[in-house]
Image (cartoon, rainbow, N blue to C red):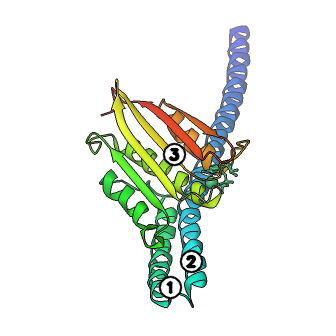
Protein backbone atom coordinates (compact mmCIF):
# COMPACT_ATOMS: atom_id res chain seq x y z
CA UNK A 1 0.00 0.00 0.00
CA UNK A 2 2.63 2.46 1.13
CA UNK A 3 4.78 1.42 -1.79
CA UNK A 4 2.13 2.10 -4.42
CA UNK A 5 1.29 5.53 -2.93
CA UNK A 6 4.97 6.35 -3.03
CA UNK A 7 5.18 5.35 -6.70
CA UNK A 8 2.09 7.45 -7.54
CA UNK A 9 3.65 10.44 -5.80
CA UNK A 10 6.84 9.98 -7.79
CA UNK A 11 4.87 9.72 -11.03
CA UNK A 12 2.85 12.84 -10.24
CA UNK A 13 6.03 14.69 -9.46
CA UNK A 14 7.56 13.63 -12.78
CA UNK A 15 4.41 14.54 -14.69
CA UNK A 16 4.34 17.93 -13.00
CA UNK A 17 7.93 18.54 -14.00
CA UNK A 18 7.09 17.59 -17.59
CA UNK A 19 4.07 19.87 -17.58
CA UNK A 20 6.16 22.72 -16.24
CA UNK A 21 8.76 22.20 -18.99
CA UNK A 22 6.04 22.07 -21.66
CA UNK A 23 4.55 25.29 -20.32
CA UNK A 24 7.89 27.05 -20.47
CA UNK A 25 8.40 25.79 -24.04
CA UNK A 26 4.89 26.90 -25.04
CA UNK A 27 5.53 30.33 -23.60
CA UNK A 28 8.83 30.58 -25.50
CA UNK A 29 7.14 29.55 -28.75
CA UNK A 30 4.32 32.05 -28.40
CA UNK A 31 6.85 34.78 -27.65
CA UNK A 32 8.84 33.83 -30.76
CA UNK A 33 5.70 33.90 -32.91
CA UNK A 34 4.82 37.33 -31.55
CA UNK A 35 8.33 38.65 -32.25
CA UNK A 36 8.20 37.26 -35.79
CA UNK A 37 4.84 38.87 -36.55
CA UNK A 38 6.04 42.20 -35.17
CA UNK A 39 9.16 42.02 -37.37
CA UNK A 40 7.07 41.13 -40.42
CA UNK A 41 4.63 43.94 -39.73
CA UNK A 42 7.47 46.42 -39.24
CA UNK A 43 8.92 45.38 -42.60
CA UNK A 44 5.55 45.84 -44.30
CA UNK A 45 5.10 49.37 -42.94
CA UNK A 46 8.71 50.33 -43.80
CA UNK A 47 8.11 49.08 -47.36
CA UNK A 48 4.83 51.00 -47.61
CA UNK A 49 6.44 54.26 -46.44
CA UNK A 50 9.40 53.76 -48.78
CA UNK A 51 7.25 53.01 -51.84
CA UNK A 52 4.45 55.47 -51.34
CA UNK A 53 6.11 58.52 -49.79
CA UNK A 54 9.36 57.99 -51.70
CA UNK A 55 7.41 58.15 -54.95
CA UNK A 56 5.47 61.31 -54.04
CA UNK A 57 8.53 63.15 -52.74
CA UNK A 58 10.42 62.33 -55.91
CA UNK A 59 7.53 63.70 -58.02
CA UNK A 60 7.47 66.82 -55.84
CA UNK A 61 11.21 67.42 -56.31
CA UNK A 62 10.84 67.00 -60.09
CA UNK A 63 8.10 69.62 -60.21
CA UNK A 64 9.97 72.11 -58.03
CA UNK A 65 13.13 71.71 -60.10
CA UNK A 66 11.12 72.25 -63.28
CA UNK A 67 9.49 75.38 -61.83
CA UNK A 68 12.90 76.70 -60.75
CA UNK A 69 14.28 76.23 -64.27
CA UNK A 70 11.33 77.79 -66.11
CA UNK A 71 10.62 80.53 -63.57
CA UNK A 72 11.97 83.39 -65.73
CA UNK A 73 11.64 81.94 -69.22
CA UNK A 74 8.09 80.68 -68.86
CA UNK A 75 6.42 82.01 -65.70
CA UNK A 76 2.97 80.79 -66.79
CA UNK A 77 4.16 77.20 -67.06
CA UNK A 78 6.18 77.55 -63.83
CA UNK A 79 3.06 78.65 -61.99
CA UNK A 80 1.12 75.67 -63.32
CA UNK A 81 3.88 73.33 -62.19
CA UNK A 82 3.98 74.93 -58.73
CA UNK A 83 0.23 74.46 -58.39
CA UNK A 84 0.69 70.82 -59.33
CA UNK A 85 3.56 70.53 -56.82
CA UNK A 86 1.27 71.81 -54.11
CA UNK A 87 -1.40 69.26 -54.99
CA UNK A 88 1.23 66.48 -54.92
CA UNK A 89 2.43 67.68 -51.50
CA UNK A 90 -1.17 67.75 -50.30
CA UNK A 91 -1.87 64.25 -51.54
CA UNK A 92 1.39 63.10 -49.90
CA UNK A 93 -0.05 63.95 -46.53
CA UNK A 94 -2.99 61.67 -47.26
CA UNK A 95 -0.50 59.08 -48.54
CA UNK A 96 1.26 59.34 -45.21
CA UNK A 97 -2.05 58.75 -43.50
CA UNK A 98 -2.54 55.75 -45.79
CA UNK A 99 0.90 54.42 -44.88
CA UNK A 100 0.09 54.81 -41.22
CA UNK A 101 -3.23 53.09 -41.84
CA UNK A 102 -1.30 50.27 -43.48
CA UNK A 103 -0.41 49.37 -39.92
CA UNK A 104 -4.03 48.39 -39.64
CA UNK A 105 -4.96 47.27 -43.12
CA UNK A 106 -3.73 47.35 -46.72
CA UNK A 107 -5.06 49.85 -49.22
CA UNK A 108 -7.62 48.43 -51.61
CA UNK A 109 -7.40 49.20 -55.32
CA UNK A 110 -10.93 49.72 -56.62
CA UNK A 111 -10.07 50.39 -60.25
CA UNK A 112 -6.63 49.36 -61.46
CA UNK A 113 -6.87 51.54 -64.55
CA UNK A 114 -7.82 54.64 -62.51
CA UNK A 115 -5.07 54.02 -60.00
CA UNK A 116 -2.46 53.64 -62.76
CA UNK A 117 -3.82 56.75 -64.46
CA UNK A 118 -3.43 58.65 -61.18
CA UNK A 119 0.25 57.71 -61.19
CA UNK A 120 0.61 58.75 -64.84
CA UNK A 121 -1.22 62.00 -64.19
CA UNK A 122 1.30 62.95 -61.52
CA UNK A 123 3.87 63.54 -64.26
CA UNK A 124 1.60 64.87 -67.00
CA UNK A 125 2.29 68.58 -66.32
CA UNK A 126 6.01 68.16 -66.75
CA UNK A 127 5.42 67.56 -70.45
CA UNK A 128 8.69 65.79 -71.13
CA UNK A 129 7.73 62.52 -69.47
CA UNK A 130 5.53 60.25 -71.53
CA UNK A 131 3.92 57.14 -70.10
CA UNK A 132 2.19 54.73 -72.50
CA UNK A 133 -0.19 52.25 -70.97
CA UNK A 134 -1.38 49.21 -72.87
CA UNK A 135 -3.80 47.21 -70.79
CA UNK A 136 -5.29 44.61 -73.07
CA UNK A 137 -7.87 42.68 -71.13
CA UNK A 138 -10.20 43.87 -68.49
CA UNK A 139 -8.05 43.17 -65.48
CA UNK A 140 -10.39 44.72 -62.95
CA UNK A 141 -11.78 41.32 -61.98
CA UNK A 142 -8.38 40.21 -60.72
CA UNK A 143 -7.97 39.43 -57.06
CA UNK A 144 -7.34 42.67 -55.04
CA UNK A 145 -3.91 41.46 -53.96
CA UNK A 146 -2.95 41.14 -57.64
CA UNK A 147 -4.13 44.64 -58.46
CA UNK A 148 -2.24 46.05 -55.49
CA UNK A 149 0.90 44.19 -56.53
CA UNK A 150 0.65 45.50 -60.13
CA UNK A 151 0.03 49.04 -58.91
CA UNK A 152 2.99 48.99 -56.53
CA UNK A 153 5.29 47.49 -59.17
CA UNK A 154 4.40 50.24 -61.63
CA UNK A 155 4.76 52.95 -58.99
CA UNK A 156 8.26 51.89 -57.95
CA UNK A 157 9.29 51.43 -61.60
CA UNK A 158 8.26 54.98 -62.44
CA UNK A 159 10.02 56.31 -59.34
CA UNK A 160 13.21 54.44 -60.26
CA UNK A 161 13.07 55.28 -63.97
CA UNK A 162 12.78 58.99 -63.29
CA UNK A 163 15.12 59.06 -60.29
CA UNK A 164 17.94 56.84 -61.55
CA UNK A 165 17.42 56.65 -65.31
CA UNK A 166 16.22 60.21 -66.03
CA UNK A 167 13.79 58.42 -68.32
CA UNK A 168 11.37 60.38 -70.50
CA UNK A 169 9.40 57.49 -71.95
CA UNK A 170 7.80 54.54 -70.18
CA UNK A 171 5.98 51.69 -71.85
CA UNK A 172 3.68 49.75 -69.57
CA UNK A 173 2.11 46.59 -70.94
CA UNK A 174 -0.31 44.36 -69.09
CA UNK A 175 -1.96 41.29 -70.50
CA UNK A 176 -2.97 37.72 -69.78
CA UNK A 177 -1.27 34.85 -71.58
CA UNK A 178 -1.97 31.18 -70.86
CA UNK A 179 -3.35 31.87 -67.39
CA UNK A 180 -0.45 34.09 -66.52
CA UNK A 181 -0.57 37.77 -65.92
CA UNK A 182 2.31 39.41 -67.78
CA UNK A 183 3.52 42.83 -66.78
CA UNK A 184 6.22 44.54 -68.82
CA UNK A 185 7.64 47.93 -67.90
CA UNK A 186 10.30 49.51 -70.06
CA UNK A 187 11.90 52.91 -69.77
CA UNK A 188 14.26 54.78 -72.10
CA UNK A 189 16.53 56.09 -69.36
CA UNK A 190 20.28 55.74 -68.92
CA UNK A 191 19.86 52.31 -67.30
CA UNK A 192 22.70 50.81 -65.29
CA UNK A 193 25.55 48.33 -65.73
CA UNK A 194 24.92 46.41 -62.56
CA UNK A 195 21.65 46.08 -60.70
CA UNK A 196 22.12 46.07 -56.94
CA UNK A 197 18.68 45.57 -55.48
CA UNK A 198 17.62 47.77 -52.59
CA UNK A 199 14.24 48.29 -50.89
CA UNK A 200 12.40 49.16 -54.10
CA UNK A 201 13.31 46.21 -56.32
CA UNK A 202 13.38 43.80 -53.36
CA UNK A 203 9.84 44.91 -52.50
CA UNK A 204 8.70 44.30 -56.09
CA UNK A 205 10.29 40.85 -56.09
CA UNK A 206 8.90 39.84 -52.68
CA UNK A 207 5.36 40.87 -53.53
CA UNK A 208 5.44 39.00 -56.86
CA UNK A 209 6.99 35.90 -55.26
CA UNK A 210 4.29 35.94 -52.59
CA UNK A 211 1.74 35.60 -55.40
CA UNK A 212 3.64 32.64 -56.84
CA UNK A 213 5.15 34.56 -59.73
CA UNK A 214 8.59 35.73 -60.72
CA UNK A 215 10.19 38.89 -62.03
CA UNK A 216 13.25 39.72 -64.11
CA UNK A 217 15.12 43.00 -64.03
CA UNK A 218 17.29 43.80 -67.00
CA UNK A 219 19.38 46.79 -67.91
CA UNK A 220 22.40 47.92 -69.87
CA UNK A 221 24.15 51.24 -69.65
CA UNK A 222 22.30 53.74 -71.85
CA UNK A 223 19.69 51.19 -72.88
CA UNK A 224 17.00 51.82 -70.32
CA UNK A 225 15.57 49.46 -67.75
CA UNK A 226 13.27 46.53 -68.30
CA UNK A 227 11.02 44.78 -65.78
CA UNK A 228 9.20 41.61 -66.79
CA UNK A 229 6.86 39.87 -64.38
CA UNK A 230 4.85 36.70 -64.80
CA UNK A 231 2.24 35.68 -62.23
CA UNK A 232 -0.03 32.62 -62.49
CA UNK A 233 -3.63 33.65 -62.11
CA UNK A 234 -5.71 30.54 -62.76
CA UNK A 235 -7.07 30.05 -59.26
CA UNK A 236 -6.98 33.66 -58.29
CA UNK A 237 -9.39 35.48 -60.61
N1 LIG B 1 14.75 52.44 -64.08
C1 LIG B 1 16.02 52.40 -63.68
N2 LIG B 1 16.99 53.00 -64.40
C2 LIG B 1 18.29 52.94 -64.02
N3 LIG B 1 18.72 52.28 -62.91
C3 LIG B 1 17.79 51.67 -62.15
C4 LIG B 1 16.40 51.69 -62.49
N4 LIG B 1 15.72 50.97 -61.55
C5 LIG B 1 16.65 50.54 -60.68
N5 LIG B 1 17.88 50.95 -61.02
C6 LIG B 1 19.14 50.61 -60.34
O1 LIG B 1 18.88 49.57 -59.41
C7 LIG B 1 19.17 50.01 -58.09
C8 LIG B 1 18.19 49.40 -57.10
O2 LIG B 1 16.89 49.97 -57.21
P1 LIG B 1 15.97 50.00 -55.93
O3 LIG B 1 14.65 50.58 -56.29
O4 LIG B 1 15.96 48.63 -55.35
O5 LIG B 1 16.75 50.93 -54.93
P2 LIG B 1 16.92 52.51 -54.93
O6 LIG B 1 15.89 53.13 -55.83
O7 LIG B 1 18.36 52.86 -55.17
O8 LIG B 1 16.61 52.90 -53.45
P3 LIG B 1 15.24 52.67 -52.74
O9 LIG B 1 15.53 51.55 -51.79
O10 LIG B 1 14.93 53.95 -52.11
O11 LIG B 1 14.22 52.26 -53.79
C9 LIG B 1 19.16 51.52 -58.15
O12 LIG B 1 19.99 52.09 -57.19
C10 LIG B 1 19.67 51.79 -59.56
O13 LIG B 1 21.08 51.71 -59.61
MG1 LIG C 1 13.85 52.57 -55.82
Comes first in the chain, label 3 or label 2:
2
Q: Quadrant of the N terminus?
A: top right
Q: CA distance from mark 3 to mark 1?
A: 29 Å
Asked if residue 11 is positioned above or below residue 181 in the image, the reply reads above
- Going 51% across and 36% down the picture, which residue do you hit? 228
Of helix, strand and loop, which one carries label 1? helix
Asked if residue 175 is positioned above or below residue 234 in the image, the reply reads below
Residue 125: quadrant of the picture: bottom left
Q: In the rendering, at what x and y percent does residue 5 appear?
A: 69, 14
Is 109 placed left or right of 41 in the picture?
Answer: left
Query: Which residue is tagged 1?
Result: 78
Comes first in the chain, label 3 or label 1:
1
Q: In the rendering, at what x and y percent does residue 44 appear?
A: 57, 51
Q: Are marks 1 and 2 in contact (CB under 8 Å)?
A: yes
- Going 56% across and 88% down the picture, which residue do you hit? 71
Comes first in the chain, label 1 or label 2:
2
Of helix, strand and loop, which one carries label 2? helix
Q: Quadrant of the C terminus?
A: top left
Q: In the rendering, at what x and y percent does residue 108 appear?
A: 37, 54
Query: Which residue is tagged 2?
Result: 66
Q: CA distance from mark 1 to mark 2?
A: 7 Å
Q: CA distance from mark 3 to mark 2?
A: 24 Å
Q: In the rendering, at what x and y percent does residue 95 appear?
A: 48, 68
Residue 186 is labelled as 3
Residue 107 is labelled as none
Q: Residues within 10 Å of mark 3 (few under 14, many from 20)?
A: many
Residue 41 vs residue 88, the one in the foreground: 88
Q: Are marks 3 and 1 in contact (CB under 8 Å)?
A: no
Amino acid sequence: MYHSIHIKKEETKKLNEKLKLSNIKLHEYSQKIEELSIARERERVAQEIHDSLGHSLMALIMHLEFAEKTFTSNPGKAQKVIIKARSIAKSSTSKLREAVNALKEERNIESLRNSINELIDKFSTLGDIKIDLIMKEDLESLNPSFKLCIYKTIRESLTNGIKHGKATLFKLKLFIEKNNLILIIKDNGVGCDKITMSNGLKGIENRIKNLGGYVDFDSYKNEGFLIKAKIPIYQKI
